């Protein structure tokens, strides 16, 4: 990590004269040897304990009951190795103090499994490596499901957003419009990355506002993706079949004298 | 280390802390041969849950000598009880203290002794304490940071862009800064089950903490003494077998904080911070 910090400094030195604040992005491979403490996770929350004991098999069970995810190890266990992360940008932010300027580094990280789950993390810290590590954790904590749908015929797997959605953060608004297969992601560099991680293959986008502020731009895209499952469509008109929350199931499992119980399978059916 | 304790059921030494298992296992209190002077006299309302009037079962004990100011009590043990009824069993409710030599202490009745680990159904967790000062973890700025400031400060052009991005406090969908600091602390000390610091300042899980109030006896302010943290629940869960696990079901607190009076150290207040579920925020959301 020390060399990477050095590399970043070189990048900043080159970039500062002209564009200012443009850090490196993309394609930066991070070799991280699996640390010993990653195996020794002591869960803090009830949900964490259930996940550690493998009573919960997929993230969808958690999303179905809107349980707050407060530990990033939950996401690691449930999504596992298919979760990729990428640093969008490292930018220095400065604060004026009596003794000069204090610089901290702000890292934007997007994580996703390219198949319907994406998360965004922003962390500011005095060192680049700490900021990146912290941002990855925050990104894992904010993983959301992304709803995908069709542009026209419902043939094959869903490939685009189900309807026109828009997201806003600060002055930036991002609008996503369903696109036919083969259109690809028609977006700027920054939202394109996020949409690739989300698993959306084709979409038209349009943005407005000061998109130069990367923080707001990426958060607006994320907000847009958050709304895909918030949009009521006729597929959801059917009456909900309520199922037990994982906490309830576990309690019932314990209460049963024989110890064997039928655990209801309540994985969410993604509409096709 | 907490792991091998399940096999080591040593005789209980009063210098250790003991967290015993599950209150529903204790039908009656028994005297321990370890303890020199057992006391059975206590007010009948002392060991009853304030809310549901059920009996309180012993949960654990911690040796906590005090040497501060004009108080010097060498042999002081804090006993922790909790309500047996499963609904309220989630929060350790009472915490009282006993002194070995002196049997009466203010007018707080002394608790009876925890049962001995002779019963086969017990899930006793003897936690061998190894005390260490919890260092305040400030970020150590290494030399990497200092040299990065030597990047040249030709910031007339970049100030405009830099101004638009500011320092942001950590945020995730469901958590805030206070929780992140709590989680960071727990990750650093992942085997800590309880923390003791007379008069110290605990790391909180949620921002608002109830007011511990004032001591009923002397009116002095209450100060923090001890807290219980979630790894305790995890280790208890690991130790419990299936039949005992349902008693642990309702234990969902994030941290339980015990305050005692700073002057007379007699009466206590216990505050628990629980996880906030979405159900509490939006009451009509959950279908069941």
Image (cartoon, coloured by chain):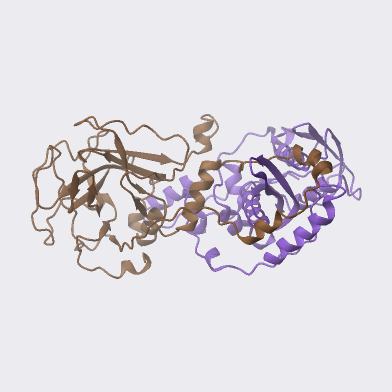
Is residue B91 something one can see in this rendering? Answer: no
Chain shown purple: that is A
Is residue B169 something one can see in this rendering? Answer: yes
- Looking at the rendered structure, the number of numbered marks drawn on it comes to 0
Tell which of B7 and B260 is nearer to you.
B260
In the rendered structure, the answer to whether residue A20 lies left or right of residue B60 reads right
Q: Residue at x 84, y 56 (%)?
A: A14
Q: Residue at x 71, y 66 (%)?
A: A3
In the rendered structure, the answer to whether residue B203 lies left or right of residue B112 reads right
- Residue A263 versus residue A7 in the image, above or below: above
Q: Quadrant of residue B271?
A: top left
Give x and y (percent) for residue B87: 34, 40
Q: In the displayed image of the protein, which residue is found farthest to the right?
A: A183
Give x and y (percent) for residue B78: 23, 49
Give x and y (percent) for residue B49: 24, 37
Chain B: drawing colour: brown
In the rendered structure, the answer to whether residue B279 lies left or right of residue B6 reads right
- Residue B79 versus residue B266 in the image, above or below: below
Q: Quadrant of residue B158?
A: top right
Specify the quadrant that holds the N terminus of chain B. bottom left
In the rendered structure, the answer to whether residue B270 lies left or right of residue A92 reads left
Give x and y (percent) for residue B167: 66, 41
Tell which of B238 and B105 is nearer to you.
B105
């Amino acid at each position: 990590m020390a060399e990477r910090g050095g590399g970043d400094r070189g990048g900043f030195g080159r970039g500062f004269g002209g564009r200012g604040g443009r850090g490196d992005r993309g394609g930066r491979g991070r070799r991280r040897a699996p640390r010993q403490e990653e195996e020794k996770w002591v869960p803090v929350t009830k949900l964490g304990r259930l996940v550690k004991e493998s009573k919960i098999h997929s993230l969808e069970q958690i999303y179905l009951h809107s349980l707050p995810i407060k530990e990033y190890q939950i996401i690691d266990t449930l999504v596992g190795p298919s979760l990729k992360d990428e640093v969008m940008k490292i930018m220095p932010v400065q604060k004026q103090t009596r003794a000069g300027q204090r610089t901290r580094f702000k890292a934007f990280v997007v994580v996703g499994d390219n198949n319907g789950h994406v998360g965004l993390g922003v962390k500011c810290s005095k060192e680049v490596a700490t900021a990146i590590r912290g941002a990855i954790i925050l990104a894992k904590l904010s993983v959301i499901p992304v709803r995908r749908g069709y542009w026209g015929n419902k043939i094959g797997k869903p490939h685009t957003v189900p309807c026109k959605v828009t997201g806003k953060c600060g002055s930036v608004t991002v609008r996503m419009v369903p696109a036919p297969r083969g259109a690809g992601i028609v977006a700027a560099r920054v939202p394109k990355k996020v949409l690739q991680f989300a698993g959306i293959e084709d979409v038209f986008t349009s943005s407005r506002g000061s998109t130069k502020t990367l923080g707001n731009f990426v958060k607006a895209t994320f907000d847009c993706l958050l709304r895909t499952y918030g949009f009521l469509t006729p597929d959801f008109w059917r009456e909900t079949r309520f199922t037990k929350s994982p906490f309830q199931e576990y309690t019932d499992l314990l209460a049963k004298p024989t110890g064997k119980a039928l655990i209801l399978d309540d994985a969410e059916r993604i509409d096709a | 280390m907490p792991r091998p304790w399940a096999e080591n059921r040593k005789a209980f030494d009063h210098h250790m802390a003991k967290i015993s298992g599950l209150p529903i296992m204790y039908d009656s209190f028994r005297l321990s041969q370890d303890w020199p002077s057992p006391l059975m006299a206590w007010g009948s309302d002392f060991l009853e849950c304030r809310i549901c009037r059920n009996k309180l079962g012993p949960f654990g004990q911690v040796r906590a000598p005090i040497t501060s100011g004009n108080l010097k009590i060498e042999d002081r043990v804090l006993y922790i009880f909790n309500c047996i009824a499963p609904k309220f069993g989630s929060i350790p409710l009472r915490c009282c203290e006993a002194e070995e030599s002196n049997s009466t202490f203010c007018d707080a009745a002394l608790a009876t002794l925890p049962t001995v680990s002779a019963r086969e159904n017990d899930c006793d967790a003897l936690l061998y304490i190894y005390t260490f000062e919890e260092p305040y973890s400030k970020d150590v700025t290494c030399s990497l940071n200092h040299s990065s400031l030597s990047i040249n400060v030709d910031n007339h052009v970049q100030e405009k862009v830099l101004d638009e991005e500011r320092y942001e406090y950590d945020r995730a969908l469901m958590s805030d800064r206070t929780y992140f600091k709590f989680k960071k602390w727990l990750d650093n000390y992942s085997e800590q089950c309880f923390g003791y610091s007379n008069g110290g300042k605990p790391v909180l899980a949620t921002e608002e903490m109830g007011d511990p109030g004032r001591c009923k006896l002397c009116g002095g302010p209450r100060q923090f003494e001890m807290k219980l943290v979630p790894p305790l629940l995890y280790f208890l869960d690991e130790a419990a077998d299936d039949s005992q696990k349902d008693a642990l079901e309702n234990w969902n607190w994030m941290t339980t904080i015990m305050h005692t009076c700073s002057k007379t150290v007699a009466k206590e207040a216990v505050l628990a911070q629980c996880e906030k579920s979405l159900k509490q925020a939006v009451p009509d959301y959950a279908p069941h």
